[in-house]
Amino acid sequence: MIHGRPEEDEQKENSYMIQLKQAHKLRRVGEINAVEYRLGFAQISFYEGDLNRVQHPHEDPLMISLIAANYLVRRVLIDLSSSANIITKWTFDQLKLALDQVCPSGNPLVGFDGRKVEPIGVITLSVTAAKRNLKENFVIVDIHPTYNLLMGRGWIH
C-alpha cells in the first residue's frame, strides 16, 4: 500500500507555494492605497531594533512610504544624488491622475545606467511626510517601475 503523494509532486507544490507567497508579498509591498487624510502623524524615528537585519557598513537605499495625491505610496526611494523627483507612468496610472494636469517637459533625463529617457511631462502633487505637507513637481517617465516614486534632494530641505 502506498501512502502520500510522489515526492516529485510534493516538490512542485512546495515550489509553487513559495512562488505564490513571494508574488503576494511583492504585490502587497508595491500596492498603492487610498487613505484618509489625517495629520496626527508621529515624527519619523529610527531605533536600534530597526537595524537588526542591517550589516554594517552598509550602502542600502533609504526606501519609505509617503502620502502622495491622497494615496499611500510604498516603495519610495530617497535619492539625494538626484536633482528631480520621478514618478513612473505605472504609478501615475495607479494614482488615477488626469492627463490635463500634466505640463510638457522638453528636458531629457539621464538614467542610472547612463541612457537618456524622454519624460512624458511634469505634474505637481501634494506629498505628506510626517507632519509636512509639500507641493512637489514630479517628472513622469515611462520606465520599468523598480520604485513607485523617486524623491530627489530638493524636497528634503
Image (tube, rainbow, N blue to C red):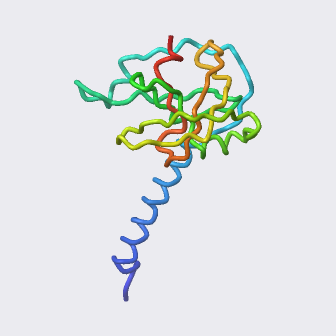
Q: Residue at x 40, y 16 (%)?
A: 47
Residue 13 image point, x, y percent: 43, 69
**9 up-or-down from 113: above or below:** below
Residue 61 image point, x, y percent: 37, 30
**126 up-or-down from 103: above or below:** above
**111 up-or-down from 26: above or below:** above
Residue situated in front as seen by the camera: 134 or 4:
134
Which image quadrant is residue 125 in? Answer: top right
Q: Residue at x 42, y 37 (%)?
A: 110
Residue 15 image point, x, y percent: 39, 65
Q: Is residue 145 left or right of residue 39?
A: left
**2 up-or-down from 84: above or below:** below
Residue 45 image point, x, y percent: 47, 14
Residue situated in front as seen by the camera: 113 or 107:
107
Which image quadrant is residue 123 in? Answer: top right
Q: Residue at x 67, y 26 (%)?
A: 124
